[in-house]
Image: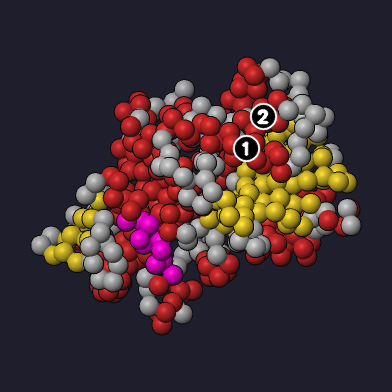
Amino acid sequence: MTVAPARQSANYWPGLDTIPSGPRAAVSSAIAKRLFHAAVERLDVTVVSGEETFGKGGPVMVIHRPEEFYARIGRHQLIGFGEAYLTGAWDTREPADLGELMTVLAAEVSDLVPQSLQKLRALVVSRPPRFHRNSEDNTQSNIAHHYDLSNDLFEEFLDASLSYSSALFPSEVVDRGDHLQALAPTAVPTAGELHEAQGAKIERLLDEAHVGEGTRVLEIGSGWGELAIRAARRGAVVRTITLSTEQKALADQRIAAAGFTEQVSVDLCDYRAVTGTYDAVLSVEMIEAVGWEYWQTYFETIDRVLAPGGRVSIQAITMPHDRMLATKRTYTWINKYIFPGGFLPSVDVIDQITRDHTTIRVTNRLSMGAHYAETLRLWDETFLGASAKVLELGFDERFLRMWHFYLEYSRGGFASGYIDVNQITFTRPQETA
C-alpha cells in the first residue's frame, strides 16, 4: 500500500511555491520583520540571518531566504511561518532544535505580538474556510485528509499498538485539588518503553469507565482498534465507530487476528448517527476533530446513548480557556496542512457544556501534558529515522518537513504547558445521590 486514493494530493499544495509580492506584501513584510526582531530579542533563542545574529541565546534558527520569510509572515502570520519552514526559507541548525525552538515560542505565543496590536487581530487573521466546518457533509473528507493518508505511514512511527494519542509513562501523580496531575515521567522515556505506556493509558481509561465482563461499550473514534481489543479482552461487547476507511480496514484485521470478531464491531458511522444504549462510552482524542460548533452535539449524543449508571471516559487535548476564546475563529497552519476543521476545547468549556446541556458531570480528571511532549518526541525521532521508508511509500521531501514540523510544533505546545491533555471521567452523580 502506498498513498491512499483519498490523498493522491499528499505531495501537492497549491500556492505554497508562490511567494507573496506586490505593494501590500512589501508593507506587511516590513512590519513583520520589525515585530519578529522585537519578539526574538527577548526570547531564549538564537536567530541567524546572513551576517546578523539576534536573540538571547538558545536553540538556533537559521533564516536562509529573509525576503521570502518575512513576506510569508507578513501576509499569513503563523501559517506563513510554518510555510516558510516547508519551503526551506528557514530551518534549525539541528533537527532536535526545532522542538526546543517551538517550546520557547509556544510559551510566549500570547505575547509575541504587542497587546496594543492584538486588538487588530480580527482584521488580520484568516478565517477557516466553510468546507472545513465539521458538518455531517464535510466531516468524512476532513477525517480522510489525515487518517486516510496511508496505514503504512502511521505504522512507520507509532508503536505496535498503533496508538495515535498520548501515552502515560510511569510518574508521580499529585492532587491539585480540582484534578490530578501526572508529573513529568520519572525517567526520560525510550522508544522501547512507548508500547507499555500506551497500554497503561488505555487501561486507565477502561478502569475509569468500569469496563469489565459484559459491559456494553461504545468507542467514538476507533483508531486502529487497540482500545476495542483491550476492552474485549476484559469481556466487554464493543461497538467502535470511525469515518476513516483506512482505519476501519486495518482495525478489522487486527481485531480478527486477536480473536474478537464476535465481540467487536467496527462501523463507518458519524457520532451523531449513533443509536443504542451503552454502559460505557469512551473516546480518545476525538473531540479535537469535532469543531467548536459541535461540542454540544457531541456531548448530547454521549448523554443520549449512555445507559443509567453508565460512565464516560475521554482523553482530550485542551488549551487555556482565554486562548480558546481568542482563537476559535482562526485558521491555523495545523488546520490547513494537518487537521482540517480541528480545534481544541478548554477544560472549562467541557465542564460548562456538560452542565448546561447534559445530565453527565465531570467527576475525575488527570492532566498529563508532559507525557504528550515525550510521546511526540519519540514519534518524531522514529519518523525521522524512517524517512527513507516514508519516501518509498510515495511521499516527498516536503512532506517529511511538514510532518517533522507538525510533530515538533505539537511537542512545543505540550512542553511549554501552552496545551495539555486530560483523561476526563463523567458520571451522573444524581443517580447515586
In the image, residue 106 lies in the stretch drawn in magenta: yes
Magenta stretch: helix, strand or loop mostly: helix
- First in residue order: circle 2 vs circle 1: 1
Q: Which residue is at 83% across, 56% downward?
A: 429
Residue type at the position of mark 1: Ile
Residue 13 falls left or right of residue 327: left
Question: Which residue position is annotated with label 1?
Answer: 202
In the image, residue 93 lies in the stretch drawn in magenta: no
Question: How far separated are the C-alphas under marks 2 and 1?
Answer: 8 Å
Q: Look at the numbered disc 1 and give the secondary structure of its residue.
A: helix
Q: Which residue is at 58% across, 33% downward?
A: 199
Residue 312 falls left or right of residue 153: right
**Image quadrant where residue 181 sits:** bottom right
| Region in magenta | 101-110
Residue 137 falls left or right of residue 24: right
Question: Which residue position is annotated with label 2?
Answer: 230
**Image quadrant where residue 110 sits:** bottom left
Q: Position of residue 275 (x, y in %)?
A: 82, 40
Q: Position of residue 47 (x, y in %)?
A: 22, 61
